[in-house]
Amino acid sequence: MVIPLLNESENIAVLYENLNKVISSYDNREIIFIDDGSTDNTFEILKALHEKDPSVKIIRFRRNFGQTAALSAGFEHASGDIIITMDGDMQNDPADIPRLLEKIDEGYDMVCGWRAGRKDPLFTKKIPSRLSNWLACRLTGVRLHDSGCTLKAFRKEVIKNIRLYGEMHRYIPAVASWMGVSIKEIPVKHNSRIHGSSKYTASRLLRGFLDLITVKFLLSYSTRPMQLFGIPGFISGFLGVFTGGYLTFIKFYYGVGIGERPLLMLAVLLMILGIQFISMGLLGEIIVRTYYEVLNKPIYAVKEIIE
């Protein structure tokens, strides 16, 4: 279990109690709480839980680094073959965990929760979330109803090979899709928040949208940036040359002055933009090749080898 926390002191005891009822029968279980720079007594409560139950592990950040960083730290320190993530605000229900594990046992690499009956404000959370999910589906091709639900289960070999930055934790399925993993989504319960306050802000929505663009680039063009920059560069350059050729033709064939025509400036601008786009694509190719060669990073993902 990997659970990020930020000022959730009022929820920890009940969360642990409910969680322990569900996972106490599993062998080699561990609960990793990440204290993401809490300013209340969250850490003191976690420390007391650890002293009572050694399976409780605590990662304490020096300051607030965000949910993506907290999950990333939890993944790095998790030792189990199956890693489950959930929020620490009691809105996710631990009773759904066995259902996630059932789907993992069926052979899926990742199981995502879908808050079908979400208990959140309509205008500040539900509508922005639906917009974000719609954009994520269109840009990444991963068909999920609820990419932002933290309640998920992963096989270790999937999540250990994913590096997260910014606000990319909500797009883990999209990043993992590049590896060809099998993903299943199931409806899960969602409770109203009783204690504490929401950490969701409008700025997180904007940052998430910018990270979605990054995810789209990583999925589609991370190993071939020339196709991203080269195509618009070629189109722009072609239009510039065509326009310039047309102006040259009417200048010498009809004797029409073109020095003060706005179309001439447009032709020059299009050609310059074309050169710039293609140059950016070439630089991107050099940077990408250097990145993969220096880090010895594979451009593929192997599921198994039979010899």
Image (tube, grey):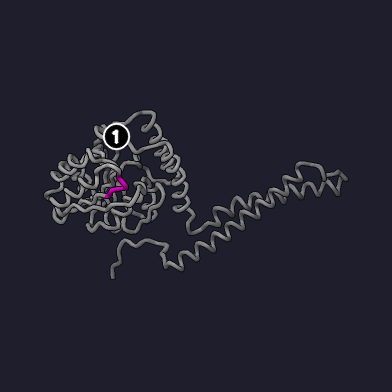
Name the residue at the bottom extreme: 307
> Relative to 191, is 165 above or below?
below
196 lies above or below 219: above
Whether residue 172 sits left or right of residue 238 in the image: it is left
Q: Position of residue 165 (x, y in %)?
A: 40, 52
Start-end of magenta stretch: 34-38
Disc 1 secondary structure class: loop
Which residue is found at the position 44% from the left and 52% from the top?
219
Q: Is residue 295 left or right of residue 189?
A: right
- Image location (x, y in percent) of residue 121: 34, 29
Q: Is residue 131 left or right of residue 115?
A: right
Secondary structure mainly formed by the magenta segment: loop
x and y, in percent, of residue 42 in the image: 24, 44
Residue labelled with disc 1:
116
Within 10 Å of disc 1 (Cα), the crowding (few <14, some 14-19, many 20+) is few
Nearer to the camera, 43 or 262? 43
Q: Quadrant of the C terminus?
A: bottom left
